[in-house]
Amino acid sequence: MTGGNAIRGTRVGSGPTVGEAERGESAPRKRVDYWCSNGHHSTPSFALDAEVPEEWDCPRCGLPAGQDQDNPPAARRNEPFKSHLAYVKERRSDEDGMAILDEALAKLRERKGR
């Protein structure tokens, strides 16, 4: 009895010997150096004809990294998390909120017959 698993005996990512003929040759590559403000160095590779980005996220700390070792880009400013209520308070004053609440309560009371 034979099993129905076509990839039995192989590992995912097992190397170039499995399926190399189907994939063909890999594109020529170039390596680009990037440095973040924490001093981490990374060298991702890009296809020769690909556009190289000015900044790259550091794989160690997540800060933006640039190609100038002496002048890495500054960390991005992250906005703090805002709840739905915080966004509503930006659009409405406390008086507007109380008026809307009173109106909604009046409708509920009218519906219940109070």
Image (tube, rainbow, N blue to C red):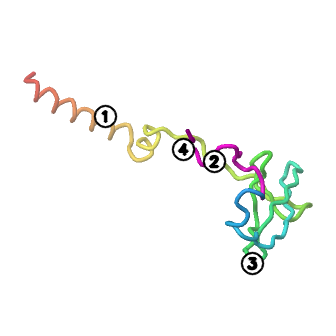
Q: Earlier in the sequence, mark 1 or mark 3?
A: 3
* Residue at numbered disc 3: 49
Q: Nearer the viewer, mark 2 or mark 4?
A: 4
| Lower position in the chain sequence, tag 1 or tag 2 | 2
Location of the C terminus (image quadrant): top left
Q: Kindly identify which residue carries mark 1.
A: 98
Which is in the foreground here, disc 4 or disc 3?
4
The tag earlier along the polypeptide, 4 or 3, is: 4
Give the CA distance from mark 4 to mark 1. Answer: 66 Å
Kind of residue indicated by mark 2: Ile
Q: Main secondary structure of the magenta part?
A: loop
Residue at which label 2 appears:
7
Instruction: Say few, some or many: other residues with alpha carbon within 10 Å of mark 2 (under 14 / 14 to 19 / 20 or more).
Output: few
Q: Label 4 neighbourhood size at 10 Å, few (<14), some (14-19), many (20+)?
A: few
Range of residues picked out in magenta: 1-16
- Which residue corresponds to mark 4? 4
